[in-house]
Amino acid sequence: MDLKQLEAFVHVAELGSFTRAAITLDTNQPALSRLVRQLEVELRHNLLERNGRGVSLTSAGQRMLSHAKGILQQVQRASQDLDELRGTSGGHFGVGVTPSFAKVATNKLVHSFRESFPGATISVAQGLSTHLIEWLMMGRIDVAVLYDTFDTPLIDKRTVHTEELFLIGPRTGDNDSQDDQPCIAGPSMVPLRDIVKYPLIIPGRMHAIRRMVESAAAEQGVRLRIALEVDAVASILDLVKEGIGYAVLPLKATSGTAQDQHFRILRISEPTLFSRLAIATSTKHTLSQLAVQSIAMLESSVLPLYGSVN
């Protein structure tokens, strides 16, 4: 395979049409079709399904698309890194962030980057920690700010912030549907072993916090009572407000205040649970000077903002 084949495949796959991709790449459709077909022959897989409305990805094509984008981005970064030796300004920085970090810090991150590197561009991708690790390995992003729950080969991680997790439930009396559920009221703490009494609305097993809470509960010899699996924090809190269940989240998730009118918040004890926010990079891919400087900017200017939100 060569870079022209990969570029052709990526454009056709993302635009869903050979015609639209040919216009974007300023080439003709037969030439583009030949490049994609050559790639399919070399890989011995059909990557695209042709139909009257355009094209769609096969299962092999879905896998190849992520790899192809990572390869092209790594080539672009290599070129940009060499340009810096000539003093050429510019380049591109790709950063992946968790939803909770994105909510608090994306605006500051973008403004700080543009002020520090006016000739460069930035892309901010949002995803779960497991997805961010995959994107790092594929070279789609330079760095990730993610929740650290386990060691991953070929990924360097450094904890930059810890935050306590709390049991979050609806305020007593806010919803009549709470009558058949335990009431969070009275004591300010709840032992981890007693969380089994509460139906939890919690992210799926791909989510770092879910894995951490389940692991801690297992060490106490208890199994979580999962009422619903919901990956979006905002949706989890909406369901908690309605009295459908309870969540285990940091205070930042409730707009940064334990006195929020919609929630009753208890500290988890025996043991207290903490999530760890980490900066991660891939050992497989060399960082450009722009990426190294951008990570330093991220640590000095953006992370303190996240840590100051209570």
Image (tube, helix red, strand yellow):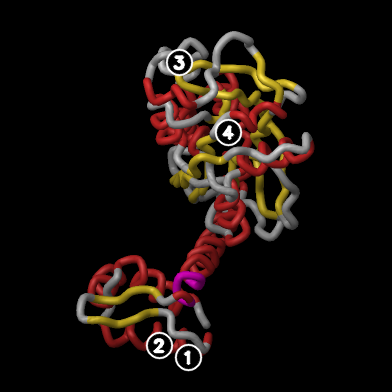
Q: Quadrant of the C terminus?
A: top right
Q: Classify 10 Å Cα crowding around label 4: few (below 14), some (14-19), many (20 and above).
A: many
Q: Is residue 75 above or below residue 296?
A: below
Residue at 63% x, 10% y is 187
**On the image, numbered disc 3 is attached to which residue?**
171
Q: Mark 1 = which residue?
A: 41
- Give how far apart the Cα atoms at labels 1 and 4 are: 43 Å
> Residue type at mark 3?
Arg
CA separation in Å, label 2 and label 4 = 42 Å
Disc 1 versus disc 3: distance between alpha carbons?
61 Å
- The picture places residue 216, in percent across and down from the top left corner, at 73, 36
Lateral position of residue 286 relative to residue 168, left or right:
right
Callout 2, which amino acid? Arg
- The first of marks 4 and 3 along the sequence is 3
- Location of mark 4 (residue): 298
Give the residue pinned by disc 2: 37
Structural distance between the alpha carbons of marks 4 and 3: 37 Å
* Of pointers 1 and 4, the one earlier in the residue sequence: 1
Q: Are marks 1 and 2 in contact (CB under 8 Å)?
A: yes
Classify mark 2: helix, strand or loop.
Answer: helix
What residue is at 62 percent from the left and 59 percent from the top?
A: 137
- Residue range of the region highlighted in magenta in the rendering: 60-64
